[in-house]
Image (tube, rainbow, N blue to C red):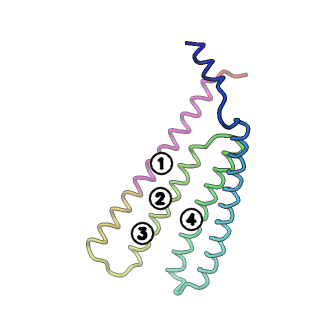
Amino acid sequence: MVMATNNHLSRKSLVPARWAEGMEDVFHVVLGIFLFGIAVAALIYSVIRVFTTSPFFPTGMIQAINDVLFIVIILEILRTIIARYTDGVFQLQNFLIIGIIAAVRHILTVGASLTLGAEKPQVSFEKAVTELLVSAGIVVALVFAIFLSRVSDIAITRASPQK
């Protein structure tokens, strides 16, 4: 049984591991630069849209908040890629935070459209309220997931032997 495991580990792959890791690193750098470019373009577009949206209150303000949260999501994804590149692992908490920001962004957008929109049919109102409830449930679930992640990190730290 041990020999079978050793034979399995000693097999050569088609692409050397160093090359694969190098290609992966290059790909992460390119993705990071691309995401940063998207964030800059979104910021420029958002600034232009703030000054050209009429009326500014409330439509322009709602769009600006929505745009800013979108840019924050892009930057959090970029931070996750950078952390993956430097640490070698994806960080669960970063993804959970991105999910929370996205859900809150959706809540704000739907809530603003309900508050500021014209009179809506009952079916549209009920759909919007359902979306708000689902998004709120997602936020609560993701916050609970962050809590569980941090509690498990603390438990692992306490269980590991001190050097």
Amino acid carrying mark 4 in the image: Leu
Q: Earlier in the sequence, mark 3 or mark 2?
A: 2
Residue at point 60%, 13% (across, down): 3
Residue at mark 2: 103
The crowding category of the residue bearing disc 2, from other C-alpha atoms within 10 Å (few below 14, some 14 to 19, many at least 20), is: many
Distance CA(mark 3)–CA(mark 1): 20 Å
The crowding category of the residue bearing disc 1, from other C-alpha atoms within 10 Å (few below 14, some 14 to 19, many at least 20), is: many
Q: Whole-percent x and y of residue 28?
A: 68, 51
Residue at mark 3: 111
Q: Whole-percent x and y of residue 102?
A: 51, 59
Amino acid carrying mark 3 in the image: Gly
Residue at mark 4: 69
Q: Whole-percent x and y of residue 95?
A: 55, 49
Q: Secondary structure at mark 3?
A: helix
Q: Earlier in the sequence, mark 3 or mark 4?
A: 4
Residue at mark 1: 142
Q: Specify start and end residues of the magenta stretch as a single range.
A: 136-160
Q: Contact (CB < 8 A) between labels 3 and 1? A: no
